[in-house]
Image (cartoon, rainbow, N blue to C red):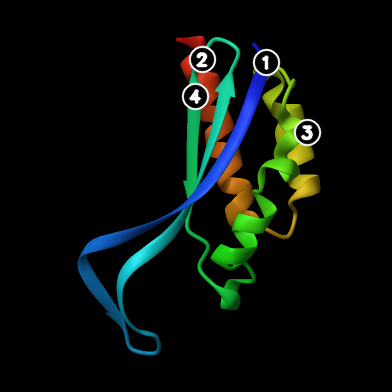
Amino acid sequence: MRIISVKSWREDLGLLRPYTIASKGTTSDVSNIIVEIELENGFKGLGASSPTGPDKGETIERSEAVLQGSHLNWLVGKKIDSIQKISTDLRRRMFDTPASRAAVDIALFDAMSLNRN
């Protein structure tokens, strides 16, 4: 089963209970990146991440830029059963954006598991 499309978008989610970190203040919402990978049979795998900011080297804006559709087009046409090869390529292509890579990796494994059931 081949990948036919890859999409990503940002979702800003409000927290039910804000939390406070002394050095950073109170947080009442979080920004997340969602990745959707669609297979030929219509199954859609989802992955998500929440880049933690400049102190970790990856901001939400950088993650959005890295996950733009054109940057992920290389996945289209790949067989989902080749997930180990795809994951190796993903690490090579996205070595400096671990949160973005995690979102794609999670979506890949979700799509693969849906396809195998």
Three-letter code, disc 3: Trp
Q: Quadrant of residue 41?
A: top right
Describe residue 10's horizontal placement relative to residue 62 as left or right.
Answer: left
Q: Are marks 1 and 4 in contact (CB under 8 Å)?
A: no
Q: Choose the circle earlier in sequence order: 1 or 4.
A: 1
Q: Residue at x 59, y 72 (%)?
A: 56
Three-letter code, disc 4: Lys
Three-letter code, disc 1: Arg
**Which residue in the structure is indicated by mark 2?**
42
User: What is the count of numbered marks?
Assistant: 4
Query: Which numbered disc covers residue 44?
Result: 4
**Which residue in the structure is indicated by mark 3?**
74
Q: Are marks 3 and 1 in contact (CB under 8 Å)?
A: no
Q: Choose the circle earlier in sequence order: 1 or 2.
A: 1
Between 85 and 3, the one nearer to me in the picture? 3
Which quadrant does the C terminus fall into?
top left
Q: Which element is circle 2 on?
A: loop
- For residue 22, above or below residue 51: below
**Which residue in the structure is indicated by mark 1?**
2
Q: Choose the circle earlier in sequence order: 3 or 1.
A: 1
Q: Choose the circle earlier in sequence order: 4 or 3.
A: 4
Label 4 vs label 2: CA separation? 6 Å
Label 4 vs label 3: CA separation? 17 Å
